[in-house]
Amino acid sequence: MLKRCSAVSVAITFLVAGNLSASLSDVAVKLLSGGISPFQYMFVRQLLCVLLLLPFWLKAPVNKRQLGSIKVTLFRSHLMLAGSGLLMVALTYLPLATANAVFYTAPLIMLPLSIWLLGEKTTSGKVVATLIGFIGVMVILRPSQFHWAAIFALGCAFTLALYNILVKKLPRREPVFITLFWTSLLSLPFAGLLSAFFWQPLSYFELVLVAASAFFTMGYHASAVSAYKRAVTSHIALAEYSGLIFVSLFGVVWFEEYPDGLTLVGILLIVLPMILGHQRK
C-alpha cells in the first residue's frame, strides 16, 4: 500500500509518528522537574542513545558503518546536544503545550533556511499557511504573558530547524541508524566535559525518565531523517505541528494542564493549514 502513496504522503506519515514519539519524550523530561542539571541530562541521554544504537551499528556491514560527512554530522551532533539542553529548561518552567507551541516555530524557521541553504523553492500558499501557523503559535504563547523560558524554547526550535535542514547535506544512501549513531557518539566528548562540572547522583526513577527520553527522541530523529530525505522540506514541514495535538492531550492526562479557549484556537490555526494543504495535493 505504501508503494501507492506519494513520497510526500509517506514523509508526512513519518513526521507525524515522529512527533508522537517526541511528545512522549517531552513528558519524560517534564517529569524530571529540573531534578538534574541540563548538562547531566544531555550527557546521560546521549550516552544511552549510543548504547541503544550500538547493536544496530555492529550488525551493519563494515562498508556501511562509515561516517559519510564528518563536518555536517559533527555540527548536527552539537545542534542535537544544544537543543536537548534548551528543551529541558523550557519544559521545566513552561506548561507542556506552551513550550511546544514555541518549539513548533521550527517549521517556520525551516522555510527560509531551506530556501537559503538548500536553494529550495516554495509557493505563496506554503508561505501563507506557515504564517497562519505562526499566528496560532503567538495566540497560544500570549506575548503579554511572556516567560523568560520561552527564549530557551525558541533556541531549541532554531537548533531543531537547522538540524533537520542539514539532513539534505548527508549522503542519501546512508542508513538512518548509522546517521543517528554517529550523531549521538560525536556529541559525547563535549557533553561529558560539561556534565563533569554539574554531576550529582541519579535516582532510579530519574534514570528511567532519561532513558525514556532517549528512546523516544531516537524515534523522532529516525522518523525525521527518513521524512526529510524523501521529500522537499517546504512540502512537509507543516506536519511537524501534529505534535502540538499530542502534547496538549498529554498535558491534560499527566499534568492537569487544561487548554483554554485561546489555546484551542491557536492549535486550530496551526493544524488546519497543514490538513487543508495536504488535501489539495
Image (cartoon, helix red, strand yellow):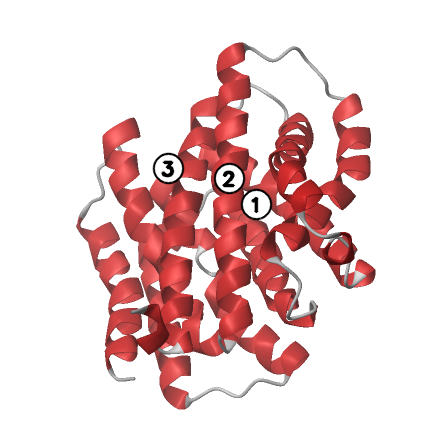
- Mark 1 vs 3, N-terminal side: 3
Could you tell me the amino acid type at mark 3? Pro
Give the side of residue 125 with respect to residue 162, left or right.
left
The residue that appears at 54% across and 44% down in the rendered structure is: 218
Query: In front: 11, or 110?
Result: 11
The residue that appears at 65% across and 27% down in the rendered structure is: 44
Under circle 3, the secondary element is: loop
Across and down, in percent, residue 64 comes to 72, 57
Could you tell me the amino acid type at mark 1? Phe
Looking at the rendering, in which quadrant would you find the N terminus?
Answer: bottom left
The residue that appears at 44% across and 30% down in the rendered structure is: 28
Task: Count all numbered tags in the image, as a single digit.
Answer: 3
Across and down, in percent, residue 171 comes to 70, 69
- Mark 2 vs 1, N-terminal side: 2
Give the side of residue 124 with respect to residue 51, left or right.
left
Across and down, in percent, residue 102 comes to 45, 53
Give the quadrant of residue 236: bottom left
In the rendered image, which residue does mark 2 sit on? Answer: 90
The span from disc 2 to disc 1 (Cα, nearest Å) is: 6 Å
In the rendered image, which residue does mark 3 sit on? Answer: 95
Mark 2 neighbour class, 10 Å CA radius: few under 14, some 14 to 19, many 20 or more: many
- Mark 3 vs 2, N-terminal side: 2
Looking at the rendering, in which quadrant would you find the C terminus?
Answer: bottom left
Say which mark, if any, is on residue 152. 1
